[in-house]
Image: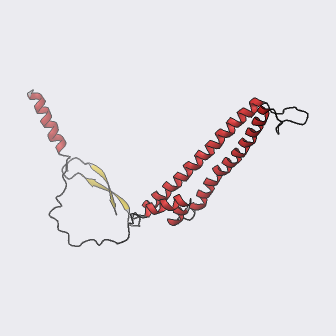
Amino acid sequence: MFLKKTIFLLLLSFFSFNIFSQKDTTNIKIKKTIPLQQGTYAPLKPARAAFYSTILPGMGQIYNKKYWKAPIVWGALAVPTYYYLINNKEYKRFRTAYRLRRTGFQDEFTNDLGVESVSLETLERAQEQLSENRDMSLLSGVIIYILQIVEASVNAHLIQFNTDDNLSIRPTLMQDPIQFDTPKVGFKLKYTF
């Protein structure tokens, strides 16, 4: 038991050489107050950008003065809209042919002699596939619509941060102030803003 306590105290004293405390900054008086810049943070700006993007896709990006993003949003929303319209048109075409054939009438896939170029099973599978493609186009359009709203809001948040040229990182090497006899060198990153 005595040996365990001795080892513990030795380890504690060994590792305590490398522990440094912070300087007490409560006694330092501030001589100069930092003036607050009025109007640098507008808490309603992200909500307004999201609202504009909800009303008209791409308008939130224009509100954030990121004009080059608006055509990207419009193009990204045009692609699923185009595929939705094409798949819906083809779905209705095959659905009409299927209904006509089930009731015994001639459809567009049956010629004048009564020869069917497409079977009834093929009409059913085409309807299922086109319906699935149409739904996926709609889902991808909704996802892109929501993402452009989120992007406008996040961009409006990030615009308000200070990103001037005074941001810097200065690596410095420092020696251990307690142990002078053994050369120890540490690495310190100091950033200022």
Give me the residue at 52% from left, 52% from top. Answer: 147
Left or right of 77: which side holds 33? left
- Quadrant hosting residue 91: top right
Task: Compare residues 141 and 192 and report the one nearer the observer.
Answer: 141
Give me the residue at 8% from left, 28% from top. Answer: 2
Left or right of 157: which side holds 130? right
Give me the residue at 65% from left, 43% from top. Answer: 134
Q: Specify the farthest residue to the front.
A: 103
Looking at the picture, how far across and down is residue 38, in whole percent?
35, 72
- Quadrant hosting residue 123: top right
Vertical relation: 38 (above or below) 12: below
Number of residue marks? 0
Left or right of 114: which side holds 89? left
Looking at the picture, how far across and down is residue 49, in whole percent?
48, 62
Task: Compare residues 155 and 184 and report the one nearer the observer.
Answer: 155
Task: Compare residues 114 and 164 and report the one nearer the observer.
Answer: 114
Q: Specify the farthest residue to the top.
A: 1
Task: Compare residues 67 and 108 and report the one nearer the observer.
Answer: 108
